[in-house]
Amino acid sequence: MSDRQAATYSNYLIYSSMIVFTLAFFLYAFSVAWQKKSESRTSNFANGQMVLGFVLLTAGVVLRGVSAHRVPWGNMYEFSITGAMAFCGAFLFANFKYKLNWLGLPVSIAILLTLGTAITLLYRPSAPLVPALRSTWLVIHVSAAIISGGVFLLANTIAATYLILDKYERTSGRPDWAKRIPALETLDLLCYRLVAFVFPLWTFAVIAGAIWAEAAWGRYWGWDPKETWAFITWVAYAAYLHARLTVGWKGRKAAWLCLLAGSTFLFNYVYVNVWGSGKHTYSGL
Amino acid sequence: MKKGNSNELEQSAFFRWLWRQLTSMRIALILLLLLAIASIPGSIFPQRTQNPIRVQSFLTENPGVGKFLDRLGFFDVYGSAWFSAIYLLLFISLVGCVLPRALVHLKESFAAPTLVPRYLNKMSHYQKISDTNLTLLEKNLRRKRYRIRIEPAALSAEKGYLRETGNLIFHLSLVVILVAIAMGALYGNKGDVILNTGDKFVNVPTSYDNLSFGRFQNENSLPSFKLTINEFRAKYDPANNQPLDYLLKANLDQNGSSNSVEIKVNQPLTIGSTKIYLQANGYAPIVLVKDKAGKEIFNGAVNFLPQDANLTSIGAIKIPDMNPQIGFVSSFLPTADRDPVRGGFSSYPEVLDPRLLISVWQGDLGMNTGVPQSVYRINTSQMQQIGLKALSVNESYDFGVGTITFTGWKPWVNLQIVNDPGKSLALIGAILATIGLLMSLFIRQRRIWVKKIEGGIEIAGLSKNEIPGLAEEISELINQSNLSSANLSKNRKLRRQ
Ligand code: HEM
């Protein structure tokens, strides 16, 4: 298989995964809207589609890497498809462990939006990396960052669900479609467990980034916009953990803080990559 | 007399109150959020430490607001008084919070678990069981490596002390990182130099184009070594002109021995605590300038400044030794191409079809006015243009009062030479922080209490931070200890009511 072929197949795989995710989205929507039981046949089928979508997407990401002879995260397009893959994987894992079928709907929407933006706005033909990006630390740094991002997004989805349901419960009570979503306390705890689980990974991602920056640019920390926002995200999640653990914030306030911390991560990804200046815009040497 | 005493009392009470506030978790949370918010402006406004030129142009474009922001430190956020105040307060709070906890933890680590609470039925995971075999229960708890305190007809067991140890390690290693950063700022130095192939670099302050010392460093703190640049190679991808690889080969003379070394983009050269990084590269065309009589006036390489990814470069060749002075405002195109709008430009970063475009100026170069001049530009306000030419290699041009010959080119490299003695300490701090964090978030600290009552025992437990798993652990313990759990469900129901 030539590099060009690999790149083309990668694109086909990503289109196919989008079709499958769309199907999963409709199935989840159907099961949320019309079915009473959480473990319905429809939602099981939808879960199966999610797994298939994940496999197709992973194959697409891998082929993209094969076509460029490197890890597939050299530009925004590749970050996005790999990020969507991590997000989907985080959901599949959490669903397997905690039975979260109801989350499938927001998760499939988020994946479709990410992939849609990637193929329409961010697409770049496959090409090798500029020298500054070619390092083992890049692989470690970016894979840790992407996995953290996937779990942060999942925690944000849960925090947002919490806030919406909380609003319903304080006014008219839960609508029918939301009856099967677990109790608010469960969501709150789940959100905390996810953040507590990835916070060390994110810490490690930032440290690996610093080690790489030291090797490439001669300083481990330079307050470059990307570094600054990674730091802000880190501090914001540390604040969330403190608020939960030591100040005893639970529920609404904690959910808002979690959303805030998650948005700093998204902001870093979008703003700094697209409009920002600094060394992380990958202009090379 | 009396009054003074009460004043003192009030004062010390006030300070104690202040200290309690500062080390309270609420203030720690506020300071953390403040630190996040205070970091934001540094990513919006240009920063002196990174890009002084952009700060200058921001100030000229927005004179009013710019001056105001400058006074508030918005162009040096991370060195500003308010940013420093936030993180220093945070760290004072951290030490004030964590040190006492460390002492308590140290004591607890060698002491027996806490006393059994008086009313177990108020605790979580509470169960009543109709069997009474405390000894077997104790044995099983010991096998699970619980630490146990025996009381009359009761026992208290605890496990997972390392969670708190991890938490303390994490917080204290943040202090280590802060100290490491300070060490770098006080005892480090950082400089830049541009070198051509063939150049020798001796590590003394005068060899640098740019050099800054930490507060406690000076000229004599530079380690002695000599670096000779032998070869620089850049490889590009013909498909998209992107750089593929850079390699610098050099000779390092140090302590009387000489070694050949290589420097790449992600592989700096390490000399003790000093590291040398390859930061940028460009071309230096070589020219030979003769006067009308054919006497050689200038012969050498002149560094040009790259303007784009294809290394279209601009530069200034200044000949102050001719009378009147001559200056060549020039561009170097490694692979020449033409465009009706842009004129001459380079279409590939490697030297395939080089051209030197020169515009010849005669007059006063203004080099003795005392105003610092850019080496890449010529101020032509006191000069007049006397010629214009595009030269291929080995081509000469006669500009009336002399000739210029474009004889070849050399690559130059920009080396960054950095000494940060705090670096390894920062790395140690970062590793410790990660380990501590993993310990504190994944080790489950929990207590189990058992009490004899009439006709059976009570059992209850507490899991720090509501980490799940204790309920399963207690049921397992009950099963292993052959305790009947027949009335378990009844008790659960009872509790709910
Ligand atoms: C540099 C700023 C700080 C950061 C990044 C930070 C980060 C964290 C993190 C991530 C945790 C969760 C780990 C765990 O569950 O044990 C934590 C816990 C904790 N932090 Fe901090 N912290 C900071 C400053 C402080 C300060 C100033 C205090 C005291 C006033 C403090 C006291 C605590 C305590 C007591 C816990 C343990 C909570 C518990 O497990 O019960 N921290 N911190």
Image (cartoon, coloured by chain):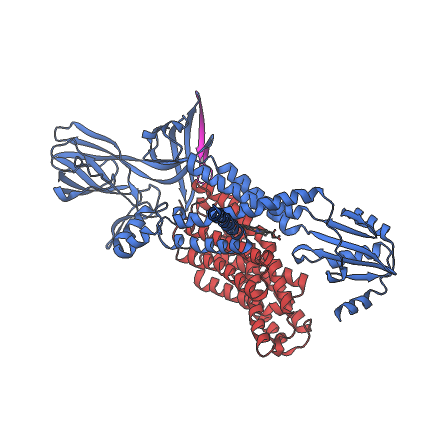
Residue at left offset 38%, top offset 55% = B44
Residue at left offset 51%, top offset 40% = B426
Q: Quadrant of residue B256?
A: top left
The answer to whether residue A136 shows anywhere in this view is no
Magenta span covers which residues? B256-269
Of residues B310 and B147, the one nearer the viewer is B147
Give residue A263's position: percent from left, percent from top: 49, 61
- Rendered hue of chain B is blue
Of residues B459 and B352, the one nearer the viewer is B459
Give residue B474's position: percent from left, percent from top: 77, 57
- Rendered hue of chain A is red
In the picture as drawn, the residue positioned furthest to the top comes out as B256
In the displayed structure, A47 sits above or below B453; it is below
Q: Quadrant of residue B189?
A: top left
- The verdict on residue B260 being magenta is yes
Work out which quarter of the rendered image holds the C terminus of chain B and state it: bottom right
- State left or right for residue B477 relative to residue A100: right
- The verdict on residue A33 being magenta is no
